[in-house]
Amino acid sequence: HDLESVRRMEYRSLGSTGYTVSCLGFGASALGGVFHDVKDEECIEVVHTALKKGVNVIDSAPWYGQGKSELMLGKALKGVPRQAYMLNTKVGRYEQAVEEMFDFSAERVTRSVDESLGRMGVDYIDCIQVHDMEFAPNLDIIIEQTLPALDKLRAAGKVKLIGITTYALEPF
């Protein structure tokens, strides 16, 4: 760590979760080559720099580069103490082809968590998030399949917290 940068970083408790998080997080979509081609070395360097400067929240998704963002994080986080960061990723949004983009079924989100764990080389995900749930065919699948599957993964120790992301500004 760069101790001066860490001292200047503001940290807050994340509700009653027990996590203390930096007010600035690292969104890892760019590591997936979403905006332009990226080199492994650059990806690793930017993650290491963020961590050294005191950022301890990292957010990714299988959707970002169709897994490449998570693969790059796996390379960058190798050898970094697991307690040094809060790792967030998502389930439900996967491929660029519209007909394969979203799948909120229990089977797919369960498989997705295992795939993400493998790509990132970690034993658990701090917060798993349902990615853009407003694109689900209906909310019933979220309530009856997605969330119960994630709760089982939490009970198994593969995820610690469950969250939801959405574009919606109004309630459903």
Image (tube, grey):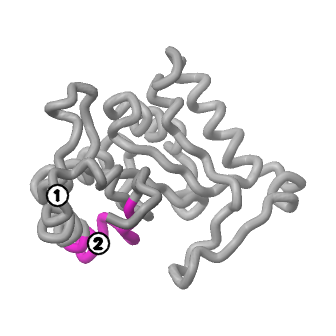
**Image x and y of residue 127, in percent:** 42, 63
Viewer-proximal residue among 140 and 46: 140
For badge 2, the amino acid type reads Arg
Viewer-proximal residue among 143 and 55: 143
Image point (69%, 54%), residue name? 24
Q: Which residues are magenta?
A: 151-164
Image point (12%, 55%), residue name? 105
From what the image shows, is residue 55 above or below residue 28? Answer: below
**Going from the N terminus, do you reach mark 2 or mark 1 first?**
1
**Image x and y of residue 88, in percent:** 45, 55
- Position of 162 compared to 17: left or right? left
- Position of 75 compared to 136: left or right? right
Give the distance between the C-alpha atoms of the residues marked 2 and 1, in whole angstroms: 24 Å
Image point (42%, 62%), residue name? 170
Give the residue at mark 1: 138
Give the crowd class for mark 2: few <14, some 14-19, many >=20 residues within 10 Å. Answer: some
Of the numbered discs in the image, which one, if any, rests on residue 70?
none
**Image x and y of residue 60, in percent:** 45, 45
